Image: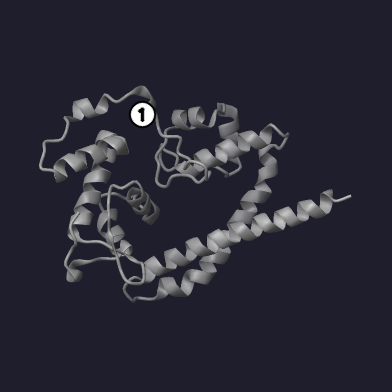
Amino acid sequence: MNAQPARALMTIGDVLGLLRADFPDVTISKIRFLEAEGLIEPQRSPSGYRKFGETDVERLRFILAAQRDHYLPLRVIKQRLDARDRGEAPPSLEAARHVPAQERRPRTLVAADTGAPEPAVRLTRRQLLDGAGIDEDLLSNLEDYGLVTRAGAHYDGEALTIARAAAALGSFGVEVRNLRALKAAADRQVGLIEQVIAPQLRRRSPGAHEQAAEAAREIADLSVRLHAALLATGLRESLDP
């Protein structure tokens, strides 16, 4: 992945705008994830912002189309990209589809050791049920209470994290209806973040939306840390003799 001329470089927000028409489900988080997996290598500005060239955009189109049209796992897509970079013929699509069963199945969808969901993952209902180890009744309850939603016929990686957590909490006797308070608290936090970044979203300067998204993620991370600290403090006070 060669360096691109400075005049051709785009922000991640610009790239998102170019891709959205053909790939409506693509998100900034998805692009970041593909970078983390080594499928793309955008440049960085002196201030640390990602900068993309036409080659990066074309590469992203290749990846997204391979996922959407051929259901190829990222491992196989990377092999095909690497072969193309070397000027070699990539494996046939038929051969690419015949991967070991453990690799055909959706990845755990939770980043190792962090518990963080992989972004922009698309799961069928059966994949979500199997991945979370839950039954239809629990998933239906999660949907009824608005904790899990789907886009069309698919669920995202967050749905898997929520379903797993709900199942684990259920083993302690926590029912789905009791989780409405957590959902309401999360909705309030989202509302607060939206208020904070609203002025940035209204700006028309280049990269404004990217900066707003960065700020939203940082605020969300800080909010989660604060919530965890407050929860720990409250439990310590309630459990101290």
- Residue 108 place in picture, x, y as percent: 46, 35
Residue depicted at x 36% and y 29%: 103
- Residue 23 place in picture, x, y as percent: 29, 49
Residue depicted at x 64% and y 53%: 184
Q: Locate residue 223 relative to residue 40 in the image: left or right.
A: right
Between 107 and 138, which is closer to the camera in this rendering? Answer: 107
Residue 46, compared with residue 54, is above or below; it is: below
Residue depicted at x 17% and y 57%: 2
Judging by the rendered image, the residue that carries numbered circle 1 is 103
Color encoding of the figure = one colour
- Residue 104 place in picture, x, y as percent: 35, 28
Residue 38, compared with residue 67, is above or below; it is: below
Residue depicted at x 34% and y 53%: 31
In the structure shown, which secondary structural element does the residue marked by tag 1 occupy? helix
Residue kind at label 1, given as amino acid type: Glu
- Residue 120 place in picture, x, y as percent: 40, 46
**Residue 188 seen in the figure:** no
| The image quarter in which residue 162 lies | top right
Neighbourhood count class around disc 1 (C-alpha, 10 Å): few under 14, some 14–19, many 20 upward: few
The quarter of the image holding the N terminus is bottom left
